[in-house]
Amino acid sequence: MKQMQIPSGMRDLFPQECAVKRDLEKRISRVFDSYGYEKIETPLIEFYATYQNTFTSLKEETMYKFVDESGQILTLRTDMTLPIARLCATKYGNVSGPFRFSYCGNIYKVRQNFAGKRNEVTDCGIELIGLDEDSDLEVLSCALDVMKTLPAENWTLEIGNSNFFRLAVKEAGIRHEDAAVLADLTDRKAMTDLMEKLDSLAISEDAGRFFRRLPLLNGKDALQEAIRFSFADSLKEEAQRFVRLEEDLNSLGYGGSFVFDFGKVPHLDYYTGIIFEAFVPGIGTAVLSGGRYDDLLKKVGRDMPAIGFSVKTDYLLDAVPEIRTEKRRLVYPKPQLREALQYAEILRKDGPVELVPDENAREMEVKG
């Protein structure tokens, strides 16, 4: 008989993995609850047009699409942020913010087989909608507290700033098309291609020096380096804002848990300010990611600033220890199932009990 397969990028989870995942979700939710975020749920399926009308650089080949009975194109949600933005613009359209929402649900994105990422991932995250960049500190604190509560070691939160790149492009007079290429090369730290691209641009020597250094502006000296290579007052002011952010995070006890990476500039059509990702040794992708996206909600009908992040619990499964579930076994004579159920009900007050019928047993016996 031909073995049945599951679609590419999907994964079956076994009982032990489910136990770990459930524990992770509980830990994360407790932190969200402690910050006053309220849990909501949105449909797994959205109209494809919702994404199409919101994102200018939509990659439809990464989406699972199908058609409903009326011929409208539907899609499995690729993230949780857009559905929540839609919710704010419709169901909460007449309610003043700010809104603090939390969620935990599956998202779907078609990826290349060799990319090493899954097509189905559980996202547990928050969205803070209606407060400006002064609230970045709150959300970063929440993200750091989430990472602290997870049973993972030697993790690091990397903090970037899409505004730093955007301001530099404006000050240097770089065209939008060239800026998009520079952003991609900088984010991927493709230094050879970046140098060639910069050599082709008519920009000042100071601006060229800045963009050549930008991918390397990370680590403990990143802030001082960012200030030193800033070739305009607007860049220096933006870097100074992050100096204050570092001071605030250190004063809150998070020193040593984060670093700055100004070369982190992905998705400039989405992020409008701070960007951050958390990495755990042994996992080749970020387990937590987020940032500020002040322009998204006005695209769905309500102009409000917003920031959020999510944790990909599936990527953590291989990096955290197994959970041992203490379970007792009640062995009982096969004809005594009713009596065994009655006895098990009493025993379950002290933990899980598994019923085990035994044709040779003469009386009930608790094991384990």
Image: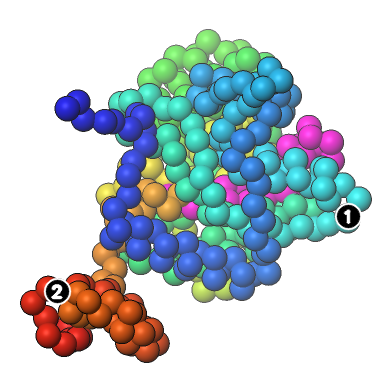
Q: Position of residue 21 (x, y in %)?
A: 39, 58
| Residue 93 belongs to the span the image colors magenta | no
Residue at 37% over, 89% down: 346
Q: Which residue is mark 2?
A: 358
Total labels drawn: 2
The residue shown at (36%, 33%) is 9
Q: Nearer the viewer, residue 289 or 363?
A: 363
Mark 1 surroundings within 10 Å by alpha-carbon count, few (fewer than 14), some (14 through 19), many (20 or more): few
Mark number for residue 95? Answer: 1
Q: Residue at x 35, y 66 (%)?
A: 151
The amino acid sitting under disc 2 is Asp
Q: Are marks 2 and 1 in contact (CB under 8 Å)?
A: no
Q: Nearer the viewer, residue 12 or 60?
A: 12
Q: Earlier in the sequence, mark 2 or mark 1?
A: 1
Say what amino acid the circle numbered 1 marks: Val
In the picture, measured across the screen, residue 260 lies left or right of residue 127, that is left
Give whichever of 265, 222 is nearer the camera.
265
Residue range in magenta is: 287-311
Indicate the position of residue 60 as horizontal and vertical percent values: 56, 20
Task: Give the image's coloring scheme.
Answer: rainbow
